[in-house]
Image: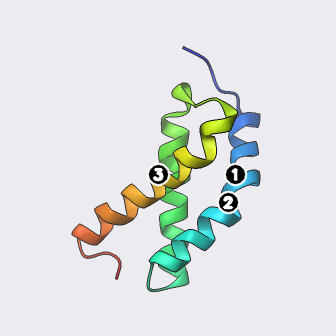
Amino acid sequence: MRKTNPTQIEKLVEDYYLPLFRFAARLCDSPANALILTQRTFRLAFDRSRNLPVPNNRRAWLFTILFAKFLEGRQRGLHS
């Protein structure tokens, strides 16, 4: 397994935070919920960073995580 250093995670946040937040804002009923959803996405990505996909797949990977978290929260009644 590959090890991920903090610089790779920082680069992920730098490259994808704003697009993910915008996507979350379109899905959620409030900016606060979008912020939480984006943070949860990066937290899960960080937890799974040992299996970080190759650079070409990272955007899709993060958006998939965010959407899955959105659906999970919706089932629990956390987002509209």
Q: Which residue is mark 1?
A: 13
Q: Is residue 20 left or right of residue 67?
A: right
x and y percentages locating residue 49 in the rendered image: 56, 32
Mark 2: few/some/many CA within 10 Å (<14, 14-19, 20+): some
Q: Nearer the viewer, mark 2 or mark 3?
A: 3
Residues at discs 1 and 2 in contact (Cβ within 8 Å): yes
Query: What's under tag 3, amino acid-wise?
Result: Thr
- Corner quadrant of residue 79: bottom left
Q: Nearer the viewer, mark 3 or mark 1?
A: 3
Q: N-terminal of the two: label 2 or label 3?
A: 2
Q: Disc 3 marks which residue?
A: 64
Q: Residue at x 55, y 40 (%)?
A: 46
Give whichever of discs 3 and 1 has the lower sequence position.
1
Eyeballing the image, is 31 above or below 45?
A: below
Query: What residue lies at 49% left-to-right and 85% top-to-bottom?
Result: 30
Q: Quadrant of the N terminus?
A: top right
Residue 4's spot in the image, x, y percent? 65, 26
Q: CB atoms at circles 3 and 1 under 8 Å apart?
A: no
Residue 31: image location, x then y, percent = 55, 82
Amino acid at circle 2: Tyr
* Vertical side of 65 occupied by 57: above or below: above
Please, what secondary structure does the residue beneath circle 2 have?
A: helix
Q: Position of residue 21 (x, y in %)?
A: 61, 68
Marks 2 and 3, how far apart at CA: 14 Å
